[in-house]
């Protein structure tokens, strides 16, 4: 697996967290599949097309996992689970502290 594909989740959450990807509505952050593909145009495989659908929670589920952290709103439109961004923030803080303590 190419490095760009391997870390797509991290790159995705970073882009959303930095406001580079997605739009805020009254219930969270909305991402369209087309917007996602345009942003990650450096990933040339079908992985970029299947990433959001593969990360979607099953209907009726509300608890995210490390691989399921999106809600499907309608065809091609997804909402990021709020816990995914909180987890990303915590991981960044931990990584920063760990690197600072080990340098």
Image: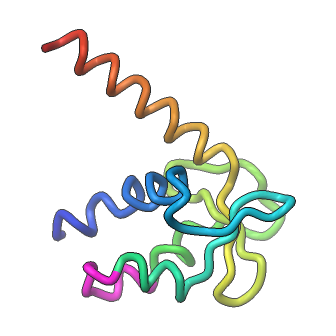
Q: Residue at x 64, y 64 (%)?
A: 70
Q: Residue at x 62, y 73 (%)?
A: 31
Point out the residue furthest to the left here: 103
Instruction: Look at the image and give the residue range highlighted in magenta.
Output: 41-49
> Where in the figure is residue 19, as x and y percent of width and height?
55, 58
Would you say 67 lies left or right of 6 here? right
Q: 51 or 96: which is nearer to us?
A: 96
Relative to 30, residue 36 above or below:
below
- Overall secondary structure of the magenta stretch? loop
Image quadrant holding the N terminus, namely bottom left
**Number of on-image labels:** 0
> Where in the figure is residue 12, as x and y percent of width and height?
44, 61
Q: Residue at x 77, y 53 (%)?
A: 62
Image quadrant holding the C terminus, namely top left
Is 23 one of the magenta-colored residues?
no
> Where in the figure is residue 2, as x and y percent of width and height?
16, 70
- Residue 47: image quadrant is bottom left
Point out the residue furthest to the front here: 19
Relative to 72, residue 91 above or below:
above
Q: 58 or 8: which is nearer to us?
A: 8
């Amino acid at each position: 697996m190419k490095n760009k594909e391997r870390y797509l989740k991290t790159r995705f959450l970073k882009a959303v967290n930095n406001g580079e990807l997605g739009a805020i509505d009254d219930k969270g952050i909305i991402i369209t599949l087309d917007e996602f593909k345009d942003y990650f145009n450096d990933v040339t495989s079908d992985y970029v097309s299947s990433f959001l659908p593969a990360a979607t929670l099953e209907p009726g589920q509300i608890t995210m996992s490390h691989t399921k952290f999106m809600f499907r709103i309608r065809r091609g439109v997804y909402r990021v689970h709020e816990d995914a961004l909180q987890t990303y923030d915590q991981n960044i803080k931990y990584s920063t502290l760990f690197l600072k303590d080990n340098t």
